[in-house]
Image (cartoon, rainbow, N blue to C red):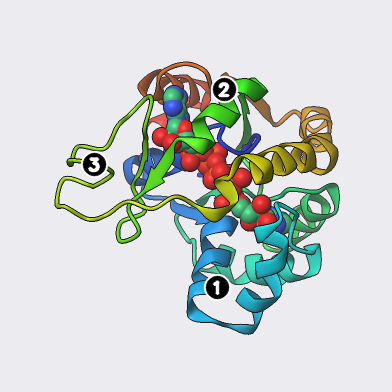
Amino acid sequence: MRLIFLGPPGAGKGTQSKLLTKRFGARHISTGDILRDHRVAGSDLGRLAEGFMRHGELVPDKLILKMIEGEVEKSPRGFIMDGFPRTVAQAEAFDALLGSKGLALDAVVLFDVDRDTLVKRLTARWTNPLTGKSYNAITNPPPGPGMRDADGTELIQREDDKPETVSKRLDVYREKTEPLVAYYRKRGKLVPVNGLAPVEEVTRQIVSALSPELQAK
Ligand code: AP5
């Protein structure tokens, strides 16, 4: 299975990637998570990415592309790309990379969610720093007392989920990433889903849009 999850910040790409990679045994490749890991580790890439991420800007294509090649090699059972590609240049380079390995994409799932909902979701998102599990103070509150997970772990908010940074990220999406909708539609790969539906319903929509061979996996 080789899927791209495309959609604005907060559309539910990470939530669905985690559920579906577990179900299908594919690899979840989140460029945002990989960059955040580099920042925590204090690597050169982490230091270079930090300023862009903090301000809701995209990290330069060159840095991202270098990172992606190794990730695809580590994914013999396929992948779900979450947050990549984000520019037409990244998409073109990714097509070339897959082509050079004789691989093809199965589908590009487009999550459709309106801006007001995205802002509400992101500013209410809380994450378990140990497991990556994500909650939402409004739609899916954490089980523990206060902002804690069931085992008592204190949940955290991402620094780029502050309202002003969320707004910048949504503008960047519209300008730099939305052109990918036309790019993949032209190639017959686009599968739109209603990202406003409840989580389980979005999962169902994605699975039912996959080919019967993929569904049977
Ligand atoms: P990244 O980490 O990729 O963030 P993003 O794309 O902005 O996406 P998010 O993780 O914020 O949202 P999501 O769609 O995964 O939503 P989620 O499932 O969590 O990127 C961060 C930064 O890294 C970028 O700004 C950039 O600087 C850099 N970067 C990363 N990749 C790059 C690239 N390729 N090129 C250049 N720079 C790059 O859901 C959100 C909330 O909603 C959660 O609380 C969840 O519980 C809730 N929710 C989810 N689904 C539903 C539902 N159906 N109903 C109700 N609530 C729901």
Image quarter for ligand 1 equals top right
Q: Position of residue 14 (x, y in %)?
A: 48, 43
Q: Position of residue 18 (x, y in %)?
A: 39, 44
**10 Å crowding of disc 3: few (<14), some (14-19), many (20+):** few
Q: CA distance from mark 1 to mark 2?
A: 29 Å
> Callout 1: helix, strand or loop?
helix
Q: Is residue 121 left or right of residue 143?
A: right
Q: CA distance from mark 1 to mark 3?
A: 27 Å
Q: Is residue 211 left or right of residue 171?
A: left
Q: Is residue 76 above or below residue 144?
A: below
Label placed on residue 39: 1
Label placed on residue 182: none
* Disc 3 residue type (three-letter): Gly
Q: Is residue 72 left or right of residue 90?
A: left
Q: Is residue 39 above or below residue 213?
A: below
Residue plotted at (53% across, 37% down): 122
* Disc 2 residue type (three-letter): Thr
Q: Which residue is mark 3?
A: 146
Q: Quadrant of residue 77?
A: bottom left
Residue plotted at (26% across, 37% down): 142
Q: Which residue is mark 2?
A: 117
Is 59 in front, or is 5? 59
Q: Quadrant of the C terminus?
A: top left
**10 Å crowding of disc 2: few (<14), some (14-19), many (20+):** few
Q: Is residue 5 above or below residue 76?
A: above
Q: Earlier in the sequence, mark 2 or mark 3?
A: 2
Q: Position of residue 22 (x, y in %)?
A: 33, 45
Q: Earlier in the sequence, mark 1 or mark 2?
A: 1
Is 46 in front, or is 195? 46
Q: CA distance from mark 2 to mark 3?
A: 23 Å
Residue plotted at (49% across, 79% down): 41
In the rendered image, is residue 159 in sight?
yes
